[in-house]
Image (tube, rainbow, N blue to C red):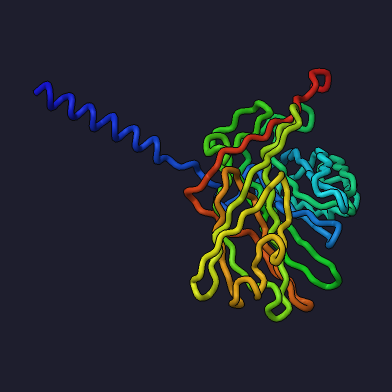
Amino acid sequence: MKKLRILLITILVMGLWVGAASAQLAVSRLNEPGSMLVFPLIDNINYNTIIEITNRSQADVWLEGYMIVHPPGAPHDFTKKSFFIHLTQKEVFWWDTGTVYNRTDASGVLTQIQSFNNYKGFCFVWAVDSEKTAIEIDWDWLKGDGLVYGNPNRAFRYNAIPHQALAIVGDRLLNLDGVEYTAAPSQVMCEGFAEGFSGAGGTWAVANLGIDFINSTQPDFDINLLAWNQNEVPADRHLAFDQFEQYDLTTDLQLAIGQVFTPKWHFASTSTGALWTVFFQWTGGLMWGGQCFQHPDSGVATTVVLPPIPVAAQ
C-alpha cells in the first residue's frame, strides 16, 4: 500500500511538472480588440504612413504611446518620443504621421503630436488612466490600422497588432508575458512572390518592443528562417536583428527568383525574441501586404520598462 501511495504521488508530481513545462504563453488574438496596439511599420521616408485608432467603448479613454524611429541613412540611430492621445467614446483617431496632429476633440480636450516626417520605424500605444498619472489600465476596446501609401501611387493597409489585457498591474511596466498582457510570437509565417517574378519586389519589416527606457537598452538577437519553394525544397536563412529592421527579398532574405527557382515561396521564423511583423510587396502600380500569421504556441515574454512619472507632475 505504501508503494502504491508513493507511485501515485510520483505520477501526480510528474503530471504537474509536465503540465507546467508544456504551458504556453497566451499569444495576442489578432481578430479581437485590445488594450495595446502595435504598428510594426511607420515609414515616412520611402512612403507616407497614416494610423487609425478606434475606441469602441462608450466611455472616454487616454492612450500613451511611443514612436521609435530613425532618420534616413542611420538605421540604428533611433529617436524615442512619447505622446498622449485622448479618445472620446466611439471616436476614430486619424493621423498622418508625417504631419503635426493638433486637434481638440468633442469633449474639448486638445491632443498635440509632432510630425515624424522623414523618419521610419514603429509605434505602439496602450490605455492609461490619464495623461497625468499614466497608469496602464484594462481597456480591451481598441482597434487600429496602418495605411502606407505613395511612391508614387502605391498603397497597402495593415491591421495594428492588438494585445489584450489579462491581469493589469499599474506599475509602468508593460509585461507582454501572457499574464499581464497577451504575448507576441517568436514564430511567424509569411508567403509571397519571389523578387523579380513579374517585376515583384518586397520587404519584411520586423519590430520588437522590449525596450528599457530607464537603462537605455533594447533587444538584439538573431532570427532564423526556414523557407520552402513550390517544389518543397527547403533552405535556411539567418538574420541579425536590432530593435527594428527592414529586410529586402534579394540581399537579406535571398528570396529572388534566381535564389528560390519558383515564383512562390513561404517561410517560418524562429528566434529567442518576440516578433511584430508586416510583409508587403509591389509590382507596377500595385501594392499589397499585412501582418504575417503567428504561431499560437510560440509566445515569448517581453517587457517594456517605461520612465517613471515625476511625483511633482501627479
In this view, which residue lies farthest toward the bottom?
A: 198
The residue located at (49%, 51%) in the rendering is: 296
Residue 282, compared with residue 298, is above or below; it is below
| Residue toward you, 305 or 309 | 305
Q: Residue at x 55, y 63 (%)?
A: 235
Q: Is residue 31 visible?
A: no
| Image: 146 above or below 109 | below
Q: Quadrant of residue 300?
A: top right
**Which quarter of the figure is the N terminus placed in?**
top left
Q: Residue furthest left?
A: 1
Name which quarter of the figure residue 153 lies in. bottom right
Observer able to see residue 256: yes
Task: Give the image quarter of residue 283.
Answer: bottom right
Residue 75 position in % (x across, y down) = 81, 49
Residue in the image at 45% along x and 42% along y: 24
Count of numbered labels shown in the rendering:
0
- Estimate the x, y position of residue 310 in percent, counting from the top left: 80, 21
Front one among 303 and 138: 303
Q: Is residue 5 left or right of residue 206?
A: left
Whether 54 is drawn above or below 176: the answer is below
Check the picture and name the quadrant holding the C terminus.
Answer: top right
Q: Residue furthest top?
A: 312
Q: Is residue 66 left or right of residue 118?
A: left
In screen coordinates, is 313 left or right of 306?
right
Q: Residue 135 at x, y = what percent?
A: 69, 29
Picture coordinates of residue 59 (x, y %)? 69, 42
Give 138 or 203, whichever is nearer the viewer: 203
Q: Residue at x 81, y 58 (%)?
A: 49
